[in-house]
Image: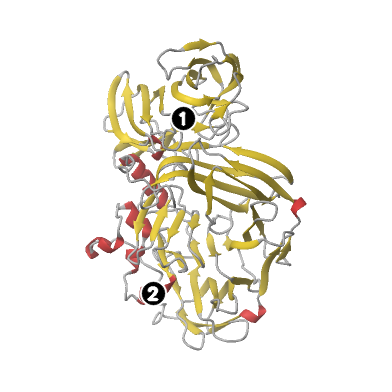
Amino acid sequence: MKNHDDSPTPPEPSRGAVRRRRLLASAAGGTALLVAAGVTVMTASLATAAAPAGGQAVIDPPAALDTSDQAPETVLLPTGDQVRMEPDGTIGLLPAEGREDVGFLAVPAADGSGDTIIVPQDNSEDILSGTEDSRRYNVTQLMADGHADAADVEASQLESYAGLPPTTDDAGAEAAQTLTVTIKDRSGGVPDNSHVTWFDTTDPDHNGSLEFDADGTATADLTPGAYLLTYSFGNGATDTEPGEQMHGISHVEIEDQSTGLLLDGAKAQPVSVEVERSDATLANDVLALAALAPGGSGVELTSFGRDATNRYLMPETDLPGYDLGFRYQQTLTGTEGGPYEYNLAFAQHGGIPDDTAFSVADDELAAVRTEYRGFGKAVDGFTCKIGDHAAASIGMGVCYLTPTSFPSERLELFTADPAINWSNLIEGGRYDADDNLLDGFREDADFVFEPGETERTFPHGPLTAGGSAMFLYNDDGVTRTESFANLGAGVNGENVNLVGYAGDATLLLDGLQVDQVSGIDPSFGFGFDLTDPAAGRYTLAVDGTRRTATGPFATTSSIAWSFDLDPTAMNPDGYQLLTLPAVGITAEGVDGGWTEDRDQELTLELVDGEGEAVTAEAITFEVSYNNGRTWKAVDVDLDGSTGTVELDHPRNARYVSTRMTATDEAGTEVTQTTIRSYGLR
């Protein structure tokens, strides 16, 4: 990553943000953002509710408390590889220098807690055998406990951590029978790599890995019952031949006698995609399988690669009580006619497609000519795209990080299918030596594309503070709150947020301060402990400033909400969620933070933290052209949640600053001020 910055590190997340991410880290499943080559991810979520390693149930916060822009956490593995976890469970792997071609496994902890253990493939034998402690690779717990370097953690601190599924089985148990599994590659030989895991369908804590001998055979003594096996096996690429990797999920019934299972790679069918452009080169592909039960439990397998590996699917088998989901994604790049990127996804529930040799024509795709402007300063960053089934996700979300300069331009072609949802991330700015974003911008947005050509300029629209929510729950007799505030947000048909604020968050009750957190970036999240919760009129006031290294916009921003609240009035699920709306601004002709329009109509809309409209009882608007020293009131033509204002900018004005107030139907009042919402040329 370029744009490394030697200035002090950005404000740390508050205690509330760290605890919030700990709750999220406890959830099973999630999204994997994997940067290394040859990654295979196998996860299981046989339980219908998630709990941390200690077994204590946690409340999963509602989706309305969006954490997509909170700070990621990082930990250094003993191998020197860096693992980055986003608040939503996204996992990013950054291999150490010289280890760019090392693959990784993401394996669920053996105790069913949902903890993720990251296993470097070149070190897997030592970790699986116990020569090296697998708990030192439990990134969920390492991050939850605030450890930055796994090698420095004392052994005594690892005692409460969960480890890998064992290679042991039920040997010695009454009625246990032997399951023998044999694997063969496509030529009938013994594969040089394998990862096969069995799962008891009735007990998420009952699982294990198979260890194969030189003949490609492994055994496990299992008590009678139904089991699912996930597997990935094959051979790595050579100087002259591509690699091959076979993937599948099988159901095995252990009864009163020994059982054998042959996984023969010669019977696997290839998975491929043909496109029109002759210079298109495979940059990355993702293959995911999932066996999902009606209640949402099940197992999944996700394989991700950037190397020359041909992928194959093993024959589909009956999975009683489970729906088999299939997903395949390819990213291809080329330069014919200008830089372009194919993002192709194929997904279905109900089994594997009859033909997995896919072919697409350009006129079947959405062709989005995208201009990545940034906010006026040249920076570097990345984009990534995840295509998944719109109705229900299949496997772990995995995306390829595409290095992207701001400004730059390329044609992006997407699968245009109502069954495919695209989750796209854009990030750019200045980074520290560990590639943590210090100052910049992010967008997380979902799209369902239609065929045809369109254009997009990023970013597009003015900036102001965004909507949020307050999540309250009881923890060991203490009422806790979690929230966040995006002080530089763009909602003009996009979901952009600035990163790098130094700010404060203050909670008041009837005008008296209850608590305060200082020196934080509020978009990372923050929280308060209410030791003596009382009903009344609360105010949550958040403000912050940011440097101009990545753009001169929204340099100072604040937002304050006043609302009636009884913190003890939890719903039957044990929590309370309060909507904290904000006024978003949309305007045409504001691209990359600048506009040439001196006569403008702005649309104001009161929205919640997810961008959904909230009915407004009143909205006011003021504008400043001298960075907030003086303000001018402008009439608002209000209709429901939306209002419009007409602006005639002075000839010598350089920046437009905005100040707005609004009141919703619930009586929540919001006041927000943004210095330099956008610029004038």
**Residue 128's mark?**
2
Left or right, 207 with reference to 302: left
Q: Nearer the viewer, residue 477 or 675?
A: 675
Q: Is residue 173 above or below residue 382?
A: below
Residue 525 position in % (x across, y down) = 38, 38
Locate residue 520, reporting x and y percent: 33, 36
Residue shown at 54%/14% (left/top)? 650
Front residue of 189/264: it is: 189
Residue 396 appears at what percent x and percent y? 53, 58
Instruction: Kindly tell me whether residue 159 is visible in this rendering.
Output: no
Counting other residues with Cα less than 10 Å from the Cα at mark 2, is it few (<14), some (14-19), or many (20 or more)? Answer: some
**In the displayed structure image, the side of residue 361 where residue 26 appears, left or right:** left
Can residue 588 be seen here? The reply is: yes
- The image quarter containing residue 268 is bottom right
Q: Secondary structure at mark 1?
A: loop
Q: Which residue is mark 1?
A: 553
Q: How many marks?
A: 2
Q: Residue furthest bottom?
A: 215
Q: Amino acid at mark 1?
A: Phe
- Residue at 55% x, 68% y is 307
CA gap, disc 1 and disc 2? 51 Å
Amino acid type of the residue that numbered disc 2 sits on in the rendered structure: Leu
Instruction: For the residues labelled 1 and 2, say whether their Cβ atoms are less than 8 Å apart.
Output: no
Quadrant of the image occupied by residue 596: top right
Q: How is the image coloured?
A: secondary structure
Q: Is residue 298 above or below residue 437?
A: below
